[in-house]
Image (spheres, grey):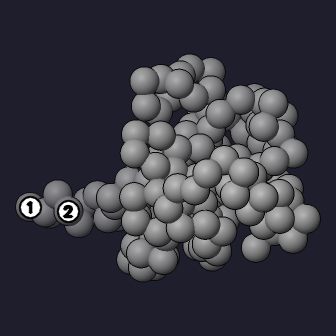
């Protein structure tokens, strides 16, 4: 009998090996039906703290909030990449390969219009560690976030 952990790993590797569609994050939110339940690859900004988070790009904040699900069963490189993210709270840019969902409510208290379940994360660039006052966060985002003047 094959151990359950090996079966889960094989399923994950099969999903990760599927072709992924590189897409701009705002195109994903502007045309969600085109990418619904598909594996996509996006570069976006991820801000998070205690019981809240958001995957976003400044150019499409008006399209609704996106929840980023970071499961425990991502590959080893994703685990190493995640360790580069500030603990507990921060703002980072990252590249995510994951399965995109919309058409329901997602995330904490079902407060999100979209969901991206990560299979892989790569290329983390820290914009801010911890939580700062709103003015400092806005300044950092305008400069370095997705859609900002000089995205990391």
Kindly identify which residue carries mark 1: 1
Label number found at residue 113: none
Across and down, in percent, residue 66 comes to 62, 38
* Label 1 element class: loop
Residue at point 52%, 56% (across, down): 131
Q: Quadrant of residue 100?
A: top right
x then y, percent, for residue 132: 58, 56
Distance from disc 2 to disc 1, alpha carbons, whole Å, reads 12 Å
Q: Quadrant of residue 102?
A: top right
Locate residue 139, reporting x and y percent: 78, 58
Residue at horizontal 34%, vertical 60%?
A: 73
Q: Is residue 7 left or right of residue 88?
A: left
Graded by Cα atoms within 10 Å as few (under 14), some (14 to 19) or many (20 or more), the crowding at tag 1 reads: few
Residue at x 14% of width, y 63% of height: 2
Residue 43 falls in image quadrant: bottom right
Count of marks, rendered view: 2
Give the residue at mark 2.
Answer: 5
- Res. 46 visible in picture: yes
Q: Residue furthest right?
A: 149
The vertical placement of 95 against 69, above or below, is below
Q: Is residue 91 left or right of residue 146?
A: left
Position of the N terminus by quadrant: bottom left
Quadrant in which the C terminus appears: bottom right
Q: Position of residue 72 (x, y in %)?
A: 33, 58
The residue sitting at 47% across, 69% down in the picture is 86
- In the image, farthest residue toward the left: 1
Secondary structure type for disc 2: helix
């Amino acid at each position: 009998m094959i151990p359950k952990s090996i079966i889960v790993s094989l399923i994950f590797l099969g999903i990760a090996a599927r072709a992924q569609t590189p897409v701009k994050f705002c195109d994903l939110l502007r045309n969600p039906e085109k990418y619904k339940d598909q594996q996509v690859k996006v570069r976006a900004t991820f801000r998070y703290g205690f019981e809240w988070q958001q995957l976003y790009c400044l150019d499409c904040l008006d399209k609704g909030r996106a929840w980023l699900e970071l499961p425990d069963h991502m590959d080893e490189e994703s685990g190493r990449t995640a360790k580069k993210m500030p603990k507990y709270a921060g703002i980072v840019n990252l590249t995510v390969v994951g399965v995109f969902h919309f058409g329901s409510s997602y995330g904490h208290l079902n407060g999100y219009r979209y969901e991206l379940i990560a299979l892989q994360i790569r290329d983390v660039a820290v914009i801010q560690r911890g939580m700062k006052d709103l003015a400092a966060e806005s300044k950092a985002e305008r400069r370095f976030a997705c859609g900002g003047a000089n995205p990391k």
